[in-house]
Amino acid sequence: MAAIHTRPTRNDNVIYVHNSEFSVSIGEKLIEELEKDPKIRKRLAELMVTDSDVRLAIINAVLADVATKSDLERMEAATKAELEKLEAATKRELEKLEERLRTEMENLRAEMKSELLKTEERLRTDFRSEIQREVRRLEDRISALESRITALENRVNAIEERLARLEGQMDLFIKLFIAFNLPTLIAVIGILLKMIFS
């Protein structure tokens, strides 16, 4: 028959059953019996309820469990409050960031508009300057053409004056030629007439 005795090990609350072939703890043996027999479980429960010390231990354990739930609820409430604070802070930061971005966009838009106006004015000025340069070049060319035309007119006037002088000289030459050669012509004509009618 198996001998039952206690032997201290790492855990002094453990009691072992020893025989020549095997060694199991009484706790494991008790659990196996409780699992097998419902009557034993019922009897154990009755003993635990009727024993004031056991009942007090159970009540303390339940109260400890309730306290843990209360702590969890407080922790949940605190966590919720922290999340709400974090959400509010994040919302404020996002609003600040949005306002800063809006301000930056407005500044950038104003800067771009100013740059565009400056560029437009610079292009208009450059275009006006280019037009003025082209106008001056055209005016210079026109002035050169006018100078050439004036020179041509002067040459034409000089030629006309020379022609007028030549015409005057030709008239005078013709008159002198007629004056000097008229008697000779008349004599020649008379001779010819005599020859014809004789």
Image: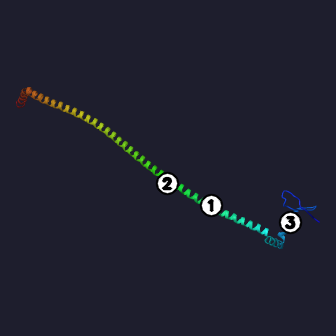
Q: Position of residue 131 (x, y in %)?
A: 34, 42
Give the residue pinned by disc 2. 99
Residue at position x 56%, y 58% in the image: 88
Q: Are marks 1 and 3 in contact (CB under 8 Å)?
A: no
Q: Amino acid at mark 3?
A: Lys
Q: Position of residue 41 (x, y in %)?
A: 82, 71
Could you tell me how far apart the alpha carbons at marks 2 and 3 are, in whole angstroms?
73 Å
**Which quadrant of the figure has residue 118?**
top left
> Which colour scheme appears in the figure?
rainbow
Q: Amino acid at mark 2?
A: Glu
Q: Position of residue 142 (x, y in %)?
A: 28, 38
Mark 1 or mark 3: which comes first in sequence? 3
Within-10-Å neighbours for mark 2: few <14, some 14–19, many 20+ = few
Mark 2 or mark 3: which comes first in sequence? 3
In screen coordinates, is 182 left or right of 164? left
Q: Which element is circle 3 on?
A: helix
Mark 2 or mark 1: which comes first in sequence? 1
Give the residue pinned by disc 3. 29
In screen coordinates, is 190 left or right of 5? left
Please state which of the two labelled residues, at mark 2 or mark 1, is closer to the viewer: 1
In front here: 84 or 105?
84
Number of on-image labels: 3
Please state which of the two labelled residues, at mark 2 or mark 3, is closer to the viewer: 3
In screen coordinates, is 92 left or right of 141? right
Marking on residue 185: none
Q: Amino acid at mark 1?
A: Ala
In front here: 198 or 144?
144
Q: Are marks 2 and 3 in contact (CB under 8 Å)?
A: no
Give the residue pinned by disc 1. 78
Q: Which element is circle 2 on?
A: helix
Q: Quadrant of the C terminus?
A: top left
Could you tell me how far apart the alpha carbons at marks 1 and 3 are, in whole angstroms?
46 Å
